[in-house]
């Protein structure tokens, strides 16, 4: 596959996808240790560890449209370099400071780093490519990210919790190296006859009702996906004594099957691709209505993996199709509001709902609710199909 990417798209795209891999590799090598270090070595409560993780998430996903706008206005290369340096400083700082305020500040700096580099990285990946290739490129991006998600935690096992300060410094230096890597990559700027304007861009987005509907329709996807970090590991531990295999199964499915799914769904419209993705997720929950077992959990993971493979590349491809070239990063940043809202709700509601229904011995209702969450966007997206000559269709 790497040779295919190099031969088809050239070293520029290959370098960007390699960076995508190393971003997720380094992230998942480091982040699982944060709560263990804070609660174990520093003696903070689990609540405070959750606050640190939430602060990092919100400071990244919640304001990513600003990071996207800065990328469009000041240059994607510049914002990626600054973003990687910020991420490096923030993550290194989490292992070098100990007071609550200092830890919160470092979490914010690390999150802001993601705000700066993430929209620009996706924007430059497709900015000089034909629209017909956008979905395929985002599919390759999905594979790169999931490959990093698999391998990163494996390297993390080389460190113990007591070595977290050392790991944090290594992580910080890794992101600094990524900044230097971006400096060496010859990124061509997007030519524009108009001056980037945040107000003009947001006005365009607000008036694009189809795009807003699709962004809203992606909130349940991220709500469900967040349970892979919360509820699914608990279930995996209950069933097998370990929860680590949950995410490994899902990411292996995505890495192995993404391009096949992308080829098979080529003729589907944007709406149909997302609808089929949600349907696969809903069907995956059905076995869990009746019995909680390793096989039924894996069946639900297959459904979620199909949803990931159908929805994510389609959504990003659609997002940039709606944006003028000079506002790619702004639109991508705005689209991440679905992740911010869905992820936050998933963290707050998903876990507590599971605990409550589990205590009442009504766990089957939990999976019914999630199946309904997956089905609701299918009907919401029908509104776009009913819109005559909609660009989304």
Image: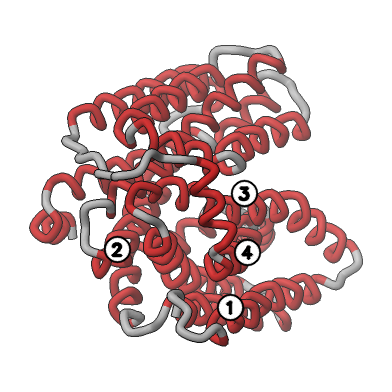
Work out whether 47 lies above or below 144.
above
Residue denoted by label 1: 381
Is residue 135 or residue 332 the one in the foreground? 332
- Going from the N terminus, do you reach mark 2 or mark 3 first? 2
The residue that appears at 21% across and 52% down in the rendered structure is 128
Q: Is residue 283 visible?
A: no
Work out whether 316 lies above or below 75.
below
* Crowdedness near tag 4: few (<14), some (14–19) or many (≥20) residues, C-alpha within 10 Å: many
The answer to the question of whether label 4 and label 1 lie on touching residues, with beta carbons closer than 8 A, is no
C-alpha separation, residue under disc 2 versus residue under disc 1: 21 Å
Residue 255 at x, y = what percent? 34, 62
In the rendered image, which quarter contains the N terminus?
Answer: bottom left
C-alpha separation, residue under disc 4 versus residue under disc 2: 22 Å
Q: Can you tell which mark lies on residue 134? A: 2
Residue 286 at x, y = what percent? 66, 82
- Going from the N terminus, do you reach mark 4 or mark 2 first? 2
- Going from the N terminus, do you reach mark 4 or mark 3 first? 4
Tag 4, which secondary structure?
helix
Tag 3, which secondary structure?
helix
- Toward which corner of the image does residue 77 lie, by quadrant? top left
Q: Can you tell which mark lies on residue 216? A: 4
C-alpha separation, residue under disc 4 versus residue under disc 1: 10 Å
Q: Can you tell which mark lies on residue 340? A: 3
In the rendered image, which quarter contains the C terminus?
Answer: bottom left
The residue that appears at 50% across and 25% down in the rendered structure is 91
Work out whether 119 lies above or below 206.
above
Residue 264 at x, y = what percent? 32, 82
Tag 1, which secondary structure?
helix
- Going from the N terminus, do you reach mark 4 or mark 1 first? 4
The answer to the question of whether label 3 and label 1 lie on touching residues, with beta carbons closer than 8 A, is no
């Amino acid at each position: 596959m790497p040779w295919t990417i190099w031969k088809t798209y050239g070293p520029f795209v290959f370098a960007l996808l390699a960076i995508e891999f190393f971003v997720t590799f380094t992230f998942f090598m480091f982040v699982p240790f944060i709560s263990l270090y804070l609660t174990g070595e520093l003696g903070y409560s689990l609540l405070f560890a959750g606050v640190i993780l939430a602060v990092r998430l919100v400071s990244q996903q919640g304001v990513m449209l600003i990071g996207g706008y800065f990328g469009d206005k000041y240059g994607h290369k510049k914002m990626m370099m600054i973003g990687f340096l910020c991420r490096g400083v923030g993550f290194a700082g989490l292992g070098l400071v100990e007071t609550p305020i200092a830890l919160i500040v470092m979490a914010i700096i690390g999150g802001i780093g993601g705000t700066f580099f993430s929209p620009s990285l996706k924007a430059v990946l497709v900015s000089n490519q034909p629209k017909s290739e956008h979905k395929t490129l985002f599919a390759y991006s999905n594979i790169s990210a999931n490959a990093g998600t698999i391998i990163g935690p494996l390297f993390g096992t080389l460190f113990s919790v007591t070595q977290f300060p050392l790991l944090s410094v290594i992580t910080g230096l890794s992101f600094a190296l990524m900044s230097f890597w971006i400096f060496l990559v010859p990124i061509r700027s997007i030519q524009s006859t108009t001056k980037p304007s945040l107000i003009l861009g947001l006005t365009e987005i607000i008036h694009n009702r189809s795009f807003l509907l699709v962004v809203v329709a992606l909130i349940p996807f991220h709500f469900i996906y967040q349970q892979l970090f919360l509820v699914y590991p608990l279930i995996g531990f209950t069933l097998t004594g370990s929860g680590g295999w949950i995410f490994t199964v899902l990411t292996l499915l995505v890495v192995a099957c993404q391009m096949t799914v992308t080829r098979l769904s080529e003729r589907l419209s944007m709406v149909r691709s997302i609808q089929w993705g949600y349907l696969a997720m809903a069907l995956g929950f059905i076995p869990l209505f009746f019995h909680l077992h390793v096989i039924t959990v894996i069946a639900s993971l297959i459904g979620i993996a199909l949803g990931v493979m159908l929805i994510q590349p389609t959504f990003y491809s659609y997002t940039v199709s709606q944006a003028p070239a000079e506002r790619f990063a702004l639109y991508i940043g705005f689209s991440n509001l679905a992740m911010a809202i869905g992820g936050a709700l998933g963290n707050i509601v998903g876990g507590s709902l599971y605990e409550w229904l589990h205590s009442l011995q009504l766990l089957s209702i939990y999976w019914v609710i999630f199946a309904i969450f997956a089905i609701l966007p299918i009907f919401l997206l029908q509104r776009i199909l009913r819109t005559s000559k909609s660009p989304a269709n």
